[in-house]
Amino acid sequence: MSATSLPLDRLQRWMQAVVVHPGSVEEAVAGAGAAAEVPAERVGDVILPTDRLTPIDRVGIYHSMYLLRMHDALEKDYEALKHFLGDRGFFRLISDY
C-alpha cells in the first residue's frame, strides 16, 4: 500500500478520522475509523517521513491544529458566548463538543 495506490476517497476518510479524533495522534491513528482505512502499522506507507519527523509526527501537526482552527472559526461567530464563558471556558466547550 502506498499513497499512490490508495484511492483518494479512502485516504481522505483516513485523514479526516485522524485529524478530528479527540485523543492523541497515536490514539487517532489506531482508532477504528482510521484503522479501517489504513492500519496503524501502515501509516508510513501513505505518509513519508522527513529527516526530522516520523509519519506520525507529520500527521500529528494537522491533528494538533484542528482544535485551534475550530476555536478561531467559532470565536468569530460566537463572540458574546466567548465573553460570557471566558477564554478557558470557551476553549473547553469547543474541546468537549
Image (spheres, rainbow, N blue to C red):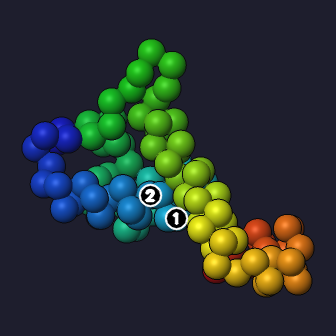
Above or below 8: residue 91: below
Residue at screen point 29% across, 64% down: 13
Q: Which mark is residue 21?
A: 1
Above or below 35: residue 3: above
Q: Quadrant of residue 95?
A: bottom right
Residue at screen point 79% across, 84% down: 81
Residue 20 in view: yes
Residue at screen point 32% across, 52% down: 39
- Please state, as top left, top right, bottom left or bottom right, where the N terminus lies in the image: top left
State the SS at label 1. loop
Residue 18 is situated, as x and y percent measured from the top left of the image, at 44, 58
On the rendered structure, is 74 left or right of 51?
right
On the rendered structure, is 49 left or right of 25?
left
Task: Please name the amino acid that badge 1 sits on.
Answer: His
Give the mark count: 2
- Give the labeled residue for mark 2: 18
Q: Residues within 10 Å of mark 2 (few under 14, many from 20)?
A: many
Residue 7 is situated, as x and y percent measured from the top left of the image, at 13, 54
Q: Nearer the viewer, residue 62 or 32?
A: 62
What is the C-alpha distance between the residues marked 1 and 2? 5 Å
Residue 75 is situated, as x and y percent measured from the top left of the image, at 69, 71
Residue 27 in view: no
State the SS at label 2. helix
